[in-house]
Amino acid sequence: MMPNLGIVILAAGLGTRMKSDKAKVLHEICGHPMIEYVVRTANAVAGSNVTVVVGHQAEMVKKTVSNVGRAHFALQEKQLGTGHAVLCALPHISDTVEQVVVLCGDVPLIQPATIQKLVADHNRYQHDVTILTIFVDNPTGYGRIVLTEDGQLTAIVEEADANPDQRKINIINTGIYVISKPFLARALPQLRADNAQNEIYLTDIIQLAYRDNRRIGTVMGSDSNEVMGVNSLAELQFVDKLMKIGRREKS
């Protein structure tokens, strides 16, 4: 486990594309709610310094998490965006935490080694914020990573807000970050819902960091399947298949 590290797991959404009344993170993969896999990974990295942001079917999500791991819970009564979700979690993060990793409860294949590598890079270069990125052939539906000519990250643009040139970018946001807690605490109240979705995006923290000459880093992931978000029944079935294949290969 990594000392002085906290992890926030975003798990408040319903997931309308799942065509179900069940909270998205409670949908099962290989017989277990997908949130279980994320919590186990978080506990392996950060011990009990894990905060799960709940919203839809909050009590059921809490029960599911408590059955498999250790976590604190933060309630996001209204789903106003990822930035708002992390803001709800902030008071529940231990005072001993210096760096905060943000994970998504619908990315069940994420591995401890990937998080550890991201945090190690963040600490090595003393970044204020570091984001895990990935190259994909089809970036549809994901936030695009906007870089300067010398490779400096300046912004993450959500697809709904992207112009035609930005939509051609194949390097995408995985939704996985590590952020210094002092910077996070200062930046979150500054985020605004000035976008097509009228939501408070956590991604906008990158623009704030760039504006304030903060140290921003990126780490390119090696496996797009590992950071795949489950947003539909087809993706749920695909990840279920991947996990079963992985288990057979290990046995």
Image: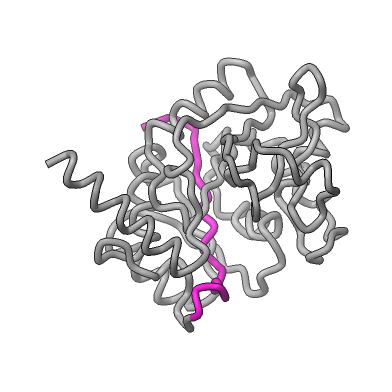
The residue under the point 72% across, 38% down is 169
Q: Is residue 250 left or right of residue 217?
A: left
Name the quarter where the N terminus is drawn: top left
Q: What stretch is highlighted in magenta?
A: 1-19
Colour scheme of the picture: one colour
* Residue 199 place in picture, x, y as percent: 77, 63
Q: Is residue 47 left or right of residue 99?
A: left
Q: In this view, does 192 lie above or below 1?
A: below
Residue 70 quadrant: bottom left
Residue 27 quadrant: bottom left
Q: In this view, does 97 lie to the left or right of 188?
A: left
The residue under the point 80% across, 32% down is 154
The answer to if 171 sits in the magenta stretch is no
Name the quarter where the C terminus is drawn: top left
Numbered disc total = 0
* Residue occupying the far bottom of the picture: 21
Q: Nearer the viewer, residue 145 or 110?
A: 145
The residue under the point 44% across, 45% down is 49
* Residue 12 place in picture, x, y as percent: 55, 67
* Residue 224 place in picture, x, y as percent: 48, 40
Q: In this view, does 198 lie to the left or right of 137?
A: right
* Residue 65 place in picture, x, y as percent: 36, 63
Q: Which of 159 and 10 is in front in this view?
A: 159
